[in-house]
Amino acid sequence: MSNKLRITVWGENVHEHKNAAVAQVYPMGMHECIAAGLRETSGTDEIEVRTATLDQPEHGLTEAVLEQTDVLTWWGHCAHGQVDDKIVDRVQQRVLQGMGLIVLHSGHYAKIFRRLLGTTCSLTWREAGERERLWVCNPGHPIAQGIDRHFELANEEMYGEPFAIPTPDEMIFISWFEGGEVFRSGATWKRGNGKIFYFRPGHETYPTYFDKNVRRVIRNAVSWAKPEGSKWIDSAPNIPVEQACEKIVSKGLSLHKAGEAGYR
Ligand code: ZN
């Protein structure tokens, strides 16, 4: 495995071609802006960034690409349903093996996020260009490093509670919006060996992914989410009696013969 952290930035890349306002904010595509932010922002690891989009064969997420990806970032909104279930299976398998996953903004409804979390991931929302204030509620966490007590985005879409997610392992940010709502905007989970971070900001009509604090958080998050440990968790090997650490004699009822190598 290379010492470099290998990142794949996945973008749906649909609004950018259908909506002039989005194309004006992100002329190279949102995925290219997110990738540029990762390349220019310093972090704890050296990184190598590539992008992949929905319209590419296998959505740009071939076996080979995922095999060479330590952390995947995901932005999608209007075309979640067009993501092939076979690719969702493949990404899920890689996360369980240890690949990190950073889910951004409207990616809360992505098939892969709902699959891994097992809930609807629904929320309330309003599009009125409101001010968003993101409070750091876990200042010792690696994802919050370099961020002040809070930071603000001048214009964002509002996301409000209830956010139908399983209780997070860790909460890093809570957002407040001009209209009064609050939202759990930075949260982590572990699935198998893989680390998952959801980060709320990033509506397509606002220049959120140019913001230095947002870029810093995503950069911190990819370093935090890098794979650790072995990949044993995706199989279920049998440990025969004669390979037990202590000498044992098989007793009681068993459906498997003594010395059987395994099943599956
Ligand atoms: Zn949005």
Image: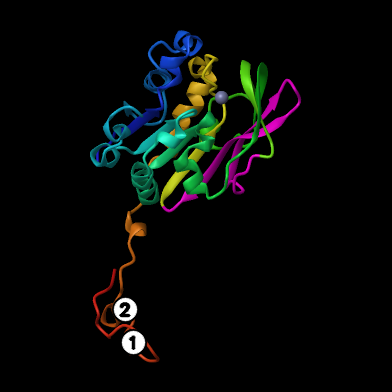
Which residue, given by chain and number where applicable, does mark 1 sit on?
A: 248
The N terminus - image quarter: top left
Residue at horizontal 38 percent and vertical 19 percent from the top: 32
Label 2: element kind: loop
**Residue 244, labelled with which disc?**
2
For badge 1, the amino acid type reads Ile
- For the record, the magenta segment spans 163-192
Mark 2 C-beta to ligand 1 under 8 Å: no
x then y, percent, for residue 102: 46, 35
Vertically, is 30 above or below 21? Answer: below
For badge 2, the amino acid type reads Ala
Vertically, is 142 above or below 217? Answer: below
Residue at horizontal 62 percent and vertical 22 percent from the top: 157
Q: Answer with the quadrant where ligand 1 appears in the image.
A: top right
Q: Residues within 10 Å of mark 1 (few under 14, many from 20)?
A: few
**Is residue 193 a member of the stretch shown in magenta?**
no
The C terminus - image quarter: bottom left
Residue at horizontal 62 percent and vertical 43 percent from the top: 164
